[in-house]
Image (tube, grey):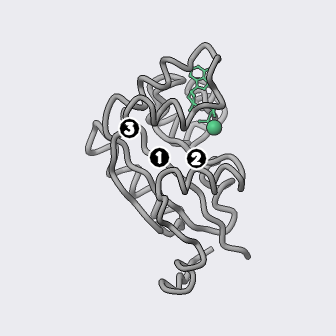
Amino acid sequence: KVLQLTLAIIKPDAVAHPLMLEALHQRILDNNFLIVRCKDLAWRRQDSEKFYAEHSGRFFYQRLVEFMSSGSMRAYILAREDAIRHWRELMGPTKVFRARYTSPSSIRAQFGLTDTRNTTHGSDSVESAQREISFFFPDFCVGEWMEKEEPSFRS
Ligand code: DAT
Ligand code: MG
């Protein structure tokens, strides 16, 4: 099994509630993800616009950009076999009400407030994972990490 990295974010709606943040952190550990990097940060509006540039023009873009720069969030680099797919599965569908119907035990079903305030983010492909990891952790070098930190991981 091949180790894969993904970028996960706990969004401002969840970080604002310490117990929710704690529950989500635990959820990551309980699902066999290795936490490679973790940091708390807040975006300026322009960071938010840049990160979500692919959605500019969509009806929810302004709302999304404003929300994502409204408070602290927590970003993770997570490692696991098939990490991208597993994390997205754990999050559930983008839309909270769909999540509640189709994946009631998913993070977005349990904690999401609205389709925009939906608790977490996860990369959706190998390419976006690479882009998003360097967006948040510009100094992170996967080769160096493999070599120096000798990750042993569960799968
Ligand atoms: P995902 O976060 O599941 O990858 P996405 O990339 O399509 O979903 O959209 C990015 C974020 O934009 C999403 O997490 C919340 C917001 N969003 C997407 N679709 C929306 C909608 N129909 N209404 C409100 N917000 C939406
Ligand atoms: Mg997306």
Tell me the distance, in whole angstroms, between the alpha carbons under discs 1 and 3. 12 Å
Tell me the distance, in whole angstroms, between the alpha carbons under discs 3 and 2. 17 Å
| Residue at far top of view | 59
Q: Which residue is mark 3?
A: 43
- Residue 152: image x %, image y %? 54, 83
At 55% from the left edge and 56% from the top edge, which residue is drawn?
Answer: 133
Q: Image quadrant of residue 130?
A: bottom right
At 60% from the left edge and 78% from the top edge, which residue is drawn?
Answer: 143
**Which is more toward the observer, 123 or 154?**
123
Q: Which residue is mark 2?
A: 122
Q: Secondary structure at mark 2?
A: strand
**Quadrant where the image shows the C terminus:** bottom right
**Which is more toward the observer, 83 or 20?**
83
What type is the residue that disc 2 sits on? Gly
Q: Between disc 1 and disc 3, whose residue precedes? A: 1
Tell me the distance, in whole angstroms, between the alpha carbons under discs 1 and 2. 7 Å
85 displayed left or right of 135: right
User: Is the CB–ligand 1 distance for label 2 below 8 Å?
Assistant: yes
Q: Which residue is mark 1?
A: 9
What type is the residue that disc 3 sits on? Trp
